[in-house]
Amino acid sequence: MLSTKSQPVIQATLPVIAERIPHITPVFYADMFKARPDLLDGMFSRSAQRDGTQARALAGSIAVFAQWILEHPDSFPEEMMSRVANKHASLGLQPHEYDTVYKYLFGAIAKDLGDAATPDIVEAWTEVYWLLARALINLERKLYAQQANDSVRAPFKLVKRTQVTKDVVDMVFEPADNTAMTPGKAGQYISIYAHTSDGLLQPRQFTLLPAEETQRRVAIKLDPQGEMTTILQKEEVGAVLDISNPYGDMTLETLETDPESPLVLICAGIGVTPVLAFVEKLAAQKSEQEVMIIASAHSLADAPLRDELLERANGLKNVKVLYGTTQEKDGDFAGRINVSTLGIPVNASVFLCGPLKFMQEIRSQLVEVGIAKHKIFYEIFGADQWMLHDQNRTEK
């Protein structure tokens, strides 16, 4: 709970900080990595720094956290914090590094605000920071304790590699040592580590696909502007890479808030990966829940894992699958998804996965046709820049 002393200070300065924080966070990261370049070796994504997504995600999390505790003094924004904690845990973030972040973040704030950063303002925002940090530390400690081992990452051998489309590779890994494996849940992800051309160890997260209990399976789509997907797609069978334990809170259990209502899974491109994991789990459970799958791709030939999704969907008793194509007229419908034409039940729980703009557009359409906001879920790859679109899950 924010102290009575800090509350009016945060209330008065939040608009200024919210406006300036997107300018502050890039300075923070630059200063921190200059002093601690080791943090880019095995923890922070260099690509996310280059394109600014990490800085924007951090800026958003600080602003929304402060706004939340002002409006809801007896609680924290659980959805946002759970997402952040899971991502941190997948990278092995340790509690002492929150001191590092504080040092360079508040140094950047002082640079940006100058004399406006009075002692009272710094003290109040310091309180906000440590409320957030300590809550995340507690969440991350619990996540670590749930694992079958105490390793941040362990070696795995690539045992199978399949080119499923021109730009997507399906990879299966098995343990390369005796580190105990934590079973993954449908919808969770792992961090895979590889060395860049200049020797830097970099992580990248990928959704777990259906596989044997002793395997980790992912689908990697080539990102021409990225760094890690190019490196990982070139790995051959026999290569040994470090992989984290499974993390992520957007699991099938999260979606099954009302098993009696229909479940609608909407995805675009490689966003099919968690959908495939959900469908496999539902089939294994012999679920009788009404399920509707709406997938979008450039063409059916470019739709990753389509054959497997259709095969696994056949294991469901009450399912409808629609594939839309945006560049070819070879799907169930042509062009961009138009929710109003697809007959989505208004009492459905809906899951979205795909590019950020795609999910924002589809979510707006869903709300327009009457889907309750608190029943729309999403998974975003990389740093989450869409936090707290509807933190109040009781909103109708």
Image: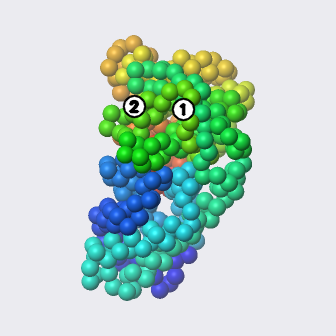
Q: Percent x, y for residue 211?
A: 64, 29
Q: Residue at x 71, y 42 (%)?
A: 178
In this view, the residue in front, 149 or 369, is 149
Residue 222 image label: 2
> Mark 2 is on which residue type?
Leu
Disc 2 is placed on an element classified as loop
| Image quarter of residue 190 | top right
Can you tell which of label 1 and label 2 is closer to the viewer? 1
| Extreme residue toward the top, this view | 330
Q: Residues within 10 Å of mark 2 (few under 14, many from 20)?
A: some
- Is the N terminus in the top left, top right, bottom left or bottom right quadrant? bottom right
Task: Name the residue at 32% across, 50% down.
Answer: 50
Q: Residues within 10 Å of mark 1 (few under 14, many from 20)?
A: few
163 or 254: nearer the viewer: 163
Q: x, y percentage for residue 85?
A: 55, 57
Task: Say which residue appears at 26% left-offset and 79% top-offset.
Answer: 114
Q: Secondary structure at mark 1?
A: loop
34 or 182, nearer to the observer: 34
Image disc number at residue 239 = 1
- Residue 355 drawn above or below residue 299: below
Q: Position of residue 244 (x, y in %)?
A: 59, 46
Q: Is residue 367 left or right of residue 185?
A: left
Callouts 1 and 2 close, C-beta under 8 Å: no
Nearer-N-terminus badge (1/2): 2
Q: How far is the residue under mark 1 from the one under mark 2?
A: 19 Å
Q: Quarter-wise, where is residue 335 in the image? A: top left
Left or right: 118 as drawn, with respect to 387: left
**Which colour scheme appears in the figure?**
rainbow
The amino acid sitting under disc 1 is Ala
